[in-house]
Image: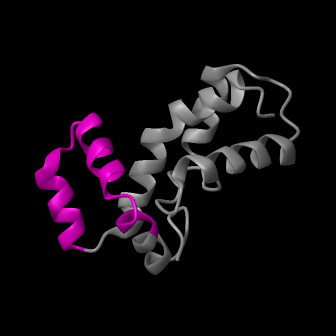
Amino acid sequence: MAHYDYKEMMIEDIKNWIEDNEIEERDFDSLYDLLWVEDSVTGNASGSYTFNAFEAKEYVTDNLELAVAAFNEFGLGLGEFGTRIANEDWEYLDVTIRCWLLSEVLGTVLEGGVI
Protein backbone atom coordinates (compact mmCIF):
# COMPACT_ATOMS: atom_id res chain seq x y z
CA MET A 1 0.00 0.00 0.00
CA ALA A 2 1.24 3.48 -0.82
CA HIS A 3 1.80 5.99 1.96
CA TYR A 4 -1.53 7.49 3.05
CA ASP A 5 -1.35 11.28 2.84
CA TYR A 6 -3.87 12.70 5.29
CA LYS A 7 -3.49 16.27 4.09
CA GLU A 8 -3.94 15.42 0.43
CA MET A 9 -6.99 13.26 1.13
CA MET A 10 -8.54 15.85 3.43
CA ILE A 11 -8.11 18.57 0.79
CA GLU A 12 -10.10 16.38 -1.60
CA ASP A 13 -12.70 15.58 1.05
CA ILE A 14 -13.21 19.26 1.88
CA LYS A 15 -13.44 20.26 -1.77
CA ASN A 16 -15.96 17.49 -2.43
CA TRP A 17 -18.03 18.40 0.62
CA ILE A 18 -18.17 22.09 -0.35
CA GLU A 19 -19.14 21.22 -3.92
CA ASP A 20 -21.65 18.51 -2.97
CA ASN A 21 -23.37 20.79 -0.47
CA GLU A 22 -23.22 23.82 -2.77
CA ILE A 23 -21.59 25.90 -0.05
CA GLU A 24 -21.07 29.50 -1.13
CA GLU A 25 -19.85 30.77 2.23
CA ARG A 26 -16.07 30.75 2.54
CA ASP A 27 -15.85 31.91 6.16
CA PHE A 28 -13.14 29.86 7.89
CA ASP A 29 -14.81 29.69 11.30
CA SER A 30 -18.21 28.66 9.95
CA LEU A 31 -16.75 25.99 7.70
CA TYR A 32 -14.44 24.75 10.45
CA ASP A 33 -17.37 24.27 12.82
CA LEU A 34 -19.36 22.38 10.18
CA LEU A 35 -16.45 20.19 9.10
CA TRP A 36 -15.39 19.39 12.68
CA VAL A 37 -18.44 17.13 12.93
CA GLU A 38 -18.64 16.02 9.30
CA ASP A 39 -18.03 12.28 8.96
CA SER A 40 -16.93 12.62 5.34
CA VAL A 41 -14.07 14.92 6.42
CA THR A 42 -13.13 14.20 10.06
CA GLY A 43 -15.33 11.32 11.18
CA ASN A 44 -15.88 13.19 14.42
CA ALA A 45 -19.70 13.03 14.44
CA SER A 46 -19.86 9.23 14.59
CA GLY A 47 -16.34 8.56 15.80
CA SER A 48 -15.25 7.02 12.52
CA TYR A 49 -14.21 8.34 9.13
CA THR A 50 -13.53 4.96 7.56
CA PHE A 51 -16.18 2.83 9.31
CA ASN A 52 -13.53 0.14 9.00
CA ALA A 53 -11.01 -0.52 11.78
CA PHE A 54 -8.58 -2.32 9.47
CA GLU A 55 -8.49 0.60 7.02
CA ALA A 56 -8.10 3.11 9.86
CA LYS A 57 -5.20 1.04 11.23
CA GLU A 58 -3.41 1.21 7.88
CA TYR A 59 -3.81 5.00 7.75
CA VAL A 60 -2.66 5.52 11.34
CA THR A 61 0.31 3.15 11.30
CA ASP A 62 1.47 4.85 8.13
CA ASN A 63 1.40 8.20 9.98
CA LEU A 64 2.28 7.55 13.61
CA GLU A 65 4.16 10.85 13.83
CA LEU A 66 0.92 12.71 13.07
CA ALA A 67 -0.94 10.75 15.73
CA VAL A 68 1.69 11.56 18.37
CA ALA A 69 1.65 15.25 17.38
CA ALA A 70 -2.16 15.35 17.52
CA PHE A 71 -2.27 13.74 20.96
CA ASN A 72 0.33 16.18 22.27
CA GLU A 73 -1.43 19.20 20.73
CA PHE A 74 -4.80 18.18 22.17
CA GLY A 75 -3.19 17.60 25.58
CA LEU A 76 -4.01 13.90 25.58
CA GLY A 77 -0.41 12.84 26.15
CA LEU A 78 1.59 9.79 25.26
CA GLY A 79 0.03 7.67 28.00
CA GLU A 80 -3.39 8.01 26.39
CA PHE A 81 -1.79 7.43 22.99
CA GLY A 82 -0.23 4.19 24.22
CA THR A 83 -3.53 3.06 25.69
CA ARG A 84 -5.35 3.71 22.41
CA ILE A 85 -2.68 1.76 20.48
CA ALA A 86 -2.81 -1.12 22.97
CA ASN A 87 -6.60 -1.21 22.71
CA GLU A 88 -6.37 -1.08 18.91
CA ASP A 89 -8.67 1.94 18.86
CA TRP A 90 -7.64 2.76 15.30
CA GLU A 91 -10.75 4.69 14.34
CA TYR A 92 -10.36 7.00 17.35
CA LEU A 93 -6.73 7.61 16.40
CA ASP A 94 -7.67 8.26 12.77
CA VAL A 95 -10.37 10.78 13.74
CA THR A 96 -7.98 12.50 16.16
CA ILE A 97 -5.46 13.03 13.36
CA ARG A 98 -8.15 14.39 11.04
CA CYS A 99 -9.48 16.81 13.66
CA TRP A 100 -5.96 18.00 14.44
CA LEU A 101 -5.19 18.63 10.76
CA LEU A 102 -8.54 20.27 9.97
CA SER A 103 -7.46 23.85 10.68
CA GLU A 104 -4.31 23.61 8.57
CA VAL A 105 -5.96 21.80 5.68
CA LEU A 106 -9.03 24.05 5.61
CA GLY A 107 -6.70 27.05 5.56
CA THR A 108 -4.86 25.54 2.60
CA VAL A 109 -8.12 25.00 0.74
CA LEU A 110 -9.44 28.51 1.39
CA GLU A 111 -6.22 30.51 1.07
CA GLY A 112 -4.70 28.50 -1.73
CA GLY A 113 -7.64 28.85 -4.02
CA VAL A 114 -7.92 25.08 -4.16
CA ILE A 115 -11.68 25.40 -4.66
Relative image position of residue 110 (x, y in whole percent): 70, 26
Q: Is residue 115 left or right of residue 106?
A: right
| Residue 105 sits above or below residue 92 on the image | above
Residue 38 in view in this figure: no
Q: Which residues are magenta?
A: 59-87
At horizontal 32% and vertical 52% (from top left) the residue drawn is 67
Return the residue found at the far bottom.
54
The foreground one among 102 and 45 is 102
Return the residue found at the far left.
79
The foreground one among 1 and 26 is 1
Q: Is residue 60 left or right of residue 50?
A: left
Q: Quadrant of residue 29?
A: top right
At horizontal 28% and vertical 35% (from top left) the residue drawn is 73
Q: Is residue 52 left or right of residue 11?
A: left
Residue 44 in view in this figure: yes
Q: Is residue 84 left or right of residue 53?
A: left
Quarter containing the C terminus: top right
Relative image position of residue 92 (x, y in whole percent): 37, 60
| Residue 51 sits above or below residue 22 on the image | below
Relative image position of residue 86 (x, y in whole percent): 18, 72
